């Protein structure tokens, strides 16, 4: 059986660190904690789980800190978690099984990262991340922000997921501040960092600058397919927020040049036409979303609702607007198969029942 070093970088995480470590400490063979300057009880809490707690001078570089944590690891594989991550019970069991059976020739295990949730706790946003990285195999973290390891060798996909459970917002300006500091020093951002820089500009409502960065990223032709598609969507969001809806539509359609349609893009196109009362076209795109095969292993950001519930509930509205109530009701019941207790489903069901009673 393989051995695993849990490698974490932390700063001022006293509210979440114990929760994280309690969910995983009995599953790993070593815990390495690198503290980048905590002023609260983070170190004290870490020392309740491991005697391997180290200091690292923060230099606005997440990759450097993570590489240091991996350097200190002594087991077969390095596993990274953030302090506000947890392994839920089902994922603990799946992780233990994966560890028991993993072929040691595997160099990287990709695992799902669940980061968005609805009010009932259902996952609304997820993507695969490199979660177990073979030690001393030549792979390093790259990127001062949104750091990543480029997998080499034999890659496997894990049956477990990591759940990201924030209790409080992080510094909303940190990532943008790091990027702009790099640019001020003359650092040239690689395509992946350009993409994430554009997203940070978007989050900060600096839409014109975000458009410029995304367009430059796309025109460079060096981006990963999934990032290209996402950049097209974010360009569209920026154009919408600067009152240029036609340019938004062009950006969404541009995404189709990179690969077959994603359900997320189809739903955005459906929304665009629905908002402009072009209901037959909206219905076309929502219907197309239902034909898109979900493939989380492509590695892009996934919104599960776009592969079932969302297009169904929107098609219910579309068909109702078009006067086809029988078809609308069928789509509402199909939406219910994904989210039986969703408020729109129950509202629509009551409407259709009242219509039937009235007849």
Image (spheres, helix red, strand yellow):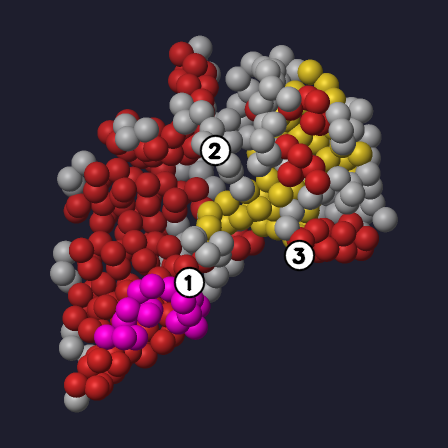
User: In this rendering, is residue 217 above or below 353?
Assistant: above
Q: Which residues are magenta?
A: 336-351
User: In this rendering, is residue 111 above or below 189?
Assistant: below
Which residue, given by chain and number where applicable, does mark 2 sit on?
168
Which residue, given by chain and number where applicable, does mark 1 sit on?
307
| Residue 6 horizontal/vertical position (percent) | 73, 35
Using the numbered discs, state the Cα–Cα distance from disc 2 to disc 3 in whole angstroms. Answer: 25 Å
As drawn, the label of residue 90 is 3
Residue 12 in view, yes or no:
yes
Q: Quadrant of residue 17?
A: top right
Callout 2–callout 3 Cβ contact below 8 Å:
no
As drawn, the label of residue 189 is none
Using the numbered discs, state the Cα–Cα distance from disc 1 to disc 2 in whole angstroms. Answer: 30 Å
For mark 3, give the secondary structure: helix
Question: Is residue 243 rendered to the left or right of residue 223?
Answer: left
Check the picture and name the quadrant holding the C terminus: bottom left
Residue 127 in view, yes or no:
no
Question: Is residue 47 rendered to the left or right of residue 315?
Answer: right
| Farthest bottom residue in view | 359
Label 2 CA crowd tier, 10 Å (few <14, some 14–19, many 20+): few
Label 1 CA crowd tier, 10 Å (few <14, some 14–19, many 20+): many
């Amino acid at each position: 059986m393989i051995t695993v070093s849990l490698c974490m970088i932390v700063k001022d995480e006293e509210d979440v660190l114990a929760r994280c470590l309690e969910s995983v400490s009995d599953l790993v063979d070593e815990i390495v904690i690198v503290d980048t300057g905590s002023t609260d009880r983070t170190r004290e809490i870490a020392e309740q789980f491991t005697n391997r707690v180290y200091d690292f001078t923060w230099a606005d570089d997440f990759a450097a800190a993570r590489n240091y944590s991996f350097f200190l690891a002594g087991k077969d594989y390095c596993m990274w978690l953030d302090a506000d991550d947890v392994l839920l019970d089902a994922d603990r069991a799946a992780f233990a099984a994966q560890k028991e059976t993993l072929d040691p020739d595997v160099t990287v295990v990709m695992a799902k990262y669940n980061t968005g949730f609805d009010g009932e706790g259902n996952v609304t946003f997820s993507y695969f991340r490199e979660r177990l990285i073979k030690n001393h195999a030549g792979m390093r973290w790259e990127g001062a922000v949104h750091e990543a390891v480029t997998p080499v060798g034999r890659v496997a996909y894990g049956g477990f997921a990591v759940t990201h459970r924030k209790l409080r917002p992080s510094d909303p300006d940190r990532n943008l501040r790091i990027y702009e500091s790099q640019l001020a020093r003359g650092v040239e951002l690689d395509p992946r960092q350009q993409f994430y820089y554009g997203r940070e500009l978007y989050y900060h409502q600096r839409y014109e600058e975000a458009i410029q960065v995304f367009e430059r990223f796309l025109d460079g032709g060096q981006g990963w397919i999934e990032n290209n598609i996402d950049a097209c969507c974010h360009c569209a969001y920026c154009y919408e927020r600067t009152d240029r809806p036609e340019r938004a539509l062009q950006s969404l359609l541009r995404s189709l040049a990179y690969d077959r349609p994603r359900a997320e893009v189809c739903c955005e196109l459906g929304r665009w036409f629905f908002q402009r009362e072009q209901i037959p076209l909206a219905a076309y795109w929502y219907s197309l979303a239902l034909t898109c095969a979900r493939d989380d292993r492509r590695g892009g950001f996934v919104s599960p609702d776009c592969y079932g519930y969302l297009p169904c509930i929107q098609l219910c509205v579309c068909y109702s607007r078009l006067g086809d109530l029988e078809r609308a009701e069928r789509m509402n019941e199909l939406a219910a198969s994904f989210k039986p207790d969703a408020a729109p489903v129950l509202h629509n069901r009551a409407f259709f029942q009242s219509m039937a009673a009235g007849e």
